[in-house]
Amino acid sequence: MRKNKSKYILLFAFMSVAIYNLWTTRNINILYVNPYWNGTTVVVVDHTPLTDRAKILWFLDHEEELKRRYKAINYWTGRVVIIDAEGGLLNLKEYPNEDLRCFDDIPSENKCVIKNTVLLVDILAQSLMHFQMGYGGKIYSLDDNGNIQPEIQEWPNMHD
């Protein structure tokens, strides 16, 4: 009996690693970019990596492409919002009860996404960025060596 249990645990671990590897090697496609939304650039992708670190690395790896190809990041950009549109672009008429963000400049009936903000990048200076996992999520920054570090978020002591 113990031998069978070990086989199932090993099989589960192998399958978990295999699924994780398949997910992380999928190419992330940029579906839409809106660079002129009140100093905020909105980037809609078809899926995002699973971990916080992988999301940040994806942004850093694609920062130049967003600047060059999409003109999405420039000297007046203060924030980049990454939205995960796992279901793709949607038609508002087909999803009237969903919480959607729609982009009027998309020349299609499918111009909306479910509001699933997964990464906020605040650009404070040329090389100073803060990365927040969704609204209200963990915050990270890059140290002087370019390593991703969690920021310590201290709340004021309400008993003083």
Image (tube, rainbow, N blue to C red):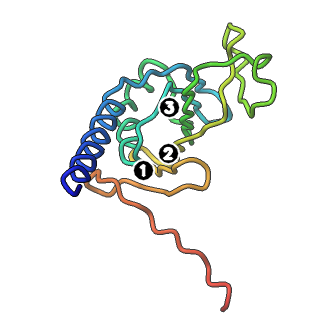
Q: Earlier in the sequence, mark 1 or mark 3?
A: 3
Write down the residue under mark 2.
123
Query: Is the C-beta separation of discs 1 and 3 under 8 Å?
Result: no
Query: In the image, what residue type sits under mark 1?
Result: Leu
- Residue 36 placement (x, y as % from top left): 63, 27
Query: Is the C-beta separation of discs 3 and 2 under 8 Å?
Result: no
Q: Could you tell whether 112 is left or right of 18 in the image?
A: right
How crowded pointer 2 is (Cα within 10 Å; few <14, some 14-19, many 20+) is rated as some
Q: Residue furthest bottom?
A: 160
Residue drawn where x is 41% and y is 55% of the image: 141
- Residue 81 placement (x, y as % from top left): 57, 37
Query: In the image, what residue type sits under mark 3?
Result: Asn
User: In the drawing, what numbered circle is on residue 128?
Assistant: 1
- Residue 41 placement (x, y as % from top left): 58, 32
Q: Earlier in the sequence, mark 1 or mark 2?
A: 2
Write down the residue under mark 3.
74
- Front residue of 57 and 1: 1
- Front residue of 27 and 64: 27
Q: Could you tell whether 102 is left or right of 55 in the image?
A: right
Location of residue 54 (image quadrant): top left
